[in-house]
Amino acid sequence: MTPEGYKLELPKWYDLHAHFRQGNMMSTLIADHKTMGCAGILAMPNTAPPVAKIEESKDLPYWSLETYHAMLEEAGAGDMETVIVPLYLTKDTTPAMIEAGKKKGLLKAVKYYPPHGTTGADFGRPLSEYIENGVFAAMQEAGVVLCMHGEEHNLASEGYFGRETNAEEYFYMERAPRVLEAYPNLKVVCEHLTTKVGVEFVKQAGVNVTATITPQHLLYTIGDLLQGLKYYLYCLPLLKFEEDRQALRGAVTAVGNAKFFAGTDSAPHTEKMTRCGCAAGCYTGGIAPQLYAQGFEAAGMDLSTDEGLASFEQFLCRVGPAFYDLRIPKECFKLEKTPHILRSRSDGIVQLPLGLSQEEETTLPWSVCST
């Protein structure tokens, strides 16, 4: 284990999958990301309404990339190195929209949601539609990244999460291969992987296929969620089993890792339990590097060694920017292996470790240094 008091100095990093919602909450969420050394963000478009058109002037019932970028910048992201907003794929997405967004310099990525598959996914359409209607072809031509929520929609419960298979495994065995068969040069991010099957799909694909992994999927399994029904761990895709967690840990700590990178999927909910069920998403804003460091240590890495530091820095700070063609910042931040007391907040947002402890405060083994 990393010795107590040891400090890591790392380039500021990009959280390449996070949720910043809309309204007054945005400034708080962006501030939390800045406190944990973030140089830039990829902000998910499943807002209300979704970010699903390029220009505000177009007569479609969505927010535009122009509008949501402006909202993020006004809320405090304007001084960040990079802000990427993927275009939400809907029934109204066309090849012409992809071409126009790329030409205007507004479009770097799009987001696929399985219909009704997670929070704010009601506008999603089956993956096959975009294979066939020219949208993925236009993306491949333009070099636009496809960010995929990799779960099959509309499965019976025994297929959604069963003893033999689940929605993510089905997606990476049946759906994702069809995308690459049709468009082998399309740049793809398989987001928030949770299964060994997903990890193997990414490993066996070309250099144009990568993946993000969250802190919670490195740290926990489905047993942690179910034992006592720790609903603050409820996120989609669901946590899986020990062999899946081992596959994720092996992927992020592998020597020479060039495919797996940080994307927290941090998602705030001021009301986690509702009459409609449990809202999906874990909030790790402000503490994600600390949780990732815990995950690496749980995988057996000593971050004070050259190998441990190189592995952690590669995952957190280098693989994602390389894939998205982003500058590695010269500015650094520091992590220290010293206890950090995490306390409940007055804004109603519950950070994941506090949700699990159900106490007013809890202690993390790592801290982000202020200097």
Image: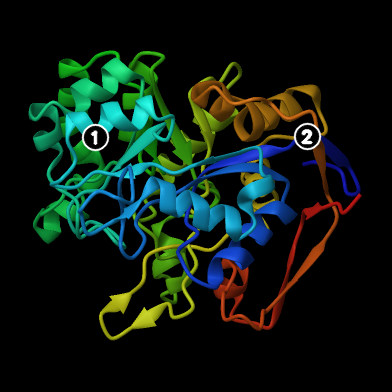
Residue 349, compared with residue 97, is above or below; it is below
Residue at mark 1: 97
- Give the image quarter of residue 185: top left
> Which mark, by number, is residue 284?
none
Residue 210, visible in the rendered structure: yes
Q: Is residue 245 left or right of residue 102?
A: right
Residue at mark 2: 10
| Residue at the (13%, 26%) spot, across then down | 134
Residue 40 is situated, as x and y percent measured from the top left of the image, at: 62, 41
| Residue at the (42%, 77%) spot, across then down | 272
Question: Label 2 neighbourhood size at 10 Å, few (<14), some (14-19), many (20+)?
Answer: some
| Residue at the (33%, 34%) spot, across then down | 198
Residue 19 is situated, as x and y percent measured from the top left of the image, at: 47, 56
Residue 133 is situated, as x and y percent measured from the top left of the image, at: 9, 30
Residue 244, compared with residue 67, is above or below; it is above
Q: Nearer the viewer, residue 349 or 243?
A: 349
Among numbered discs 2 and 1, the one appearing first in the sequence: 2
Q: Compute the Cα span from label 2 to label 1.
A: 38 Å
- Give the image quarter of residue 178: top left
| Residue at the (68%, 83%) spot, across then down | 360
Q: Is residue 15 left or right of residue 209?
A: right
